[in-house]
Image: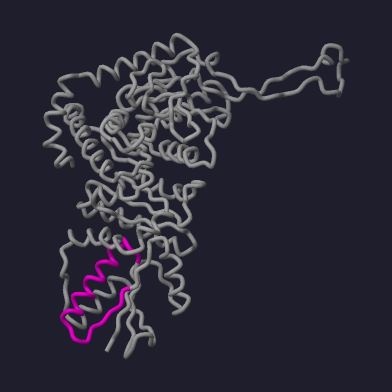
Amino acid sequence: MPYFIINGYAGCPNFGHAIIVAQYLSERLPNFEFKKVEVAPTEWGDHVMDINKCSNWYLTKSPVIWKEIHQWGSKRYLLGGLGEFWEYVYCYYGLESIIPKADLRNLAANNLKVRGVAERLKYTRIISIIGATSLVTTLLLKELFEVPNLKKRDGIIVRLFDENHNDERKYSMMEDMAIYYNSLSIFGRDQIVFIVNNLEELLDNCDLLIIVEDFRPNNQSQYEVTLKRCFAKMNYLSEAVNSSKHRSLRIIFSGQGPLCFLATCLVEFCTTVRPSDIVVLAADEGLSYISVLSEKTGIPVSKISAPPVWGFIGIHSFVDEAQTVFKADVYRPNLRSLTAPHGSTLPLGTIKSELRLMSYLITDHDEVVRTVEERKKKITKLQERPTIFRKIRSVISLLKLWYAEQPSDDIISLGVCSDGSFDIPAGMVFAQPAKLDSRFRWLPFAEYPLMDDFTRAKIKECKESSSRFLEQSHLLHHMCKDSEDISSNPH
């Protein structure tokens, strides 16, 4: 009589599928027995390595299934993964699919609820991503695992979620990502990636939530409808966040669309997350100016910092390129240079670096903006999508600061909850200079100097536009009126 051993990690849908099939057969056949060997996601790499070493196999994916003849512990006969297991049971027992596809996707989440897994998750950094089929996610994951101090003792777990997970093509994209990064874990990488299909599982013990979903309307005529739906989605998400009761959750908005509006809604509705832990990516808008500034001033890109970004990201924002800081090489002559004879080989001075503002080199703000926008449109047209690498660079830079061992003195452009600084209405998430405090909270940097009247006027324009947007009574009325109906099915 054959004895089957099914190895896998909690959260793997193929492992859960294999277990259901084995249970089905064991209940109906007198001579079918199996044993389940389940490990935590972060332990899968070491576990499958031990299997390979013991049996001289070369396997990476979960599950790993073999059979033993006559008794437990006898010689192993490899079957393979889920596909090979299905082929075996179909050939020998004539069994075809017994589980609807929709039900299979719930197995991954259910398998995580096993004894001991919750305890191990305390020592694992759990990162959840909404909008996982975005190209940003594909490229972000590669660098996410390399961020210093992001890993906890037992590594990182990444959960992928997309509202269109029932779309076979999009689900396949997430599955391919999970399979690829999970296969890397056998080379000593303490990481695991898996897919979840509801917000409850996504937010369970979550430490960091990254939202890369595209919230832009399909066309301008649908703008108001899109805003209502955004309002309803944030209402729905906040209910799930409040239910998770995870006070230390950090949330980053880094997708496309009215991001500051979304974050402002979340700040309003979320009662269990600190407002300072809900932020919107803004530095990426400034990064698009660096190459243009380099061309117009002749200063190398490596010596130019990202310019400050102000505004309600996705609605009305202003990049203050004149206040861009750059490193200038300054020649400082010695007194000897006044009396030294011609041809003297003695040093007549030194070259030192100092930080300067670019305001005296930039004379036409509109020309710089026009050049940047033209390049954006050209690249978007060629790629048939917005550029994404600036977002990835900005997210990684933000995480390096947020998860450093000590709070940094760096001042960055970030959408944060206003405390009234710069006369920005308190409670509104607004892009502005921000800095970490001693408790790793992102707060407005109120001491940031506003150098000229032009900058003040532009910031005032952004503030007034944002306030008018939020105060549109008819829009908020429709949002509040329809939110109950839409939030019951926000997708």
The picture quadrant where one finds residue 233 is top left
Identify the residue at horizontal 25%, vertical 38% (top origin).
Answer: 238
Quadrant of the image containing the N terminus: bottom left
Identify the residue at horizontal 23%, vertical 46% (top origin).
Answer: 163
Return the x and y of residue 126 as percentages of the image width and height: 38, 50
Q: Is residue 53 above or below residue 372?
A: below
Q: Is residue 37 above or below residue 399?
A: below
- Give the left or right position of residue 26, taking residue 179 as reference: left
Query: Relative to the observer, which residue lies in front, 186 or 83?
Result: 186
Identify the residue at horizontal 43%, vertical 55% (top origin).
Answer: 123
Query: Relative to the observer, which residue lies in front, 280 or 235?
Result: 235
Quadrant of the image containing the C terminus: top left
Q: Which residues are magenta?
A: 9-36
245 falls in the magenta region? no
Query: Relative to the observer, which residue lies in front, 229 or 71?
Result: 71
Return the x and y of residue 110 as percentages of the image width and height: 25, 60
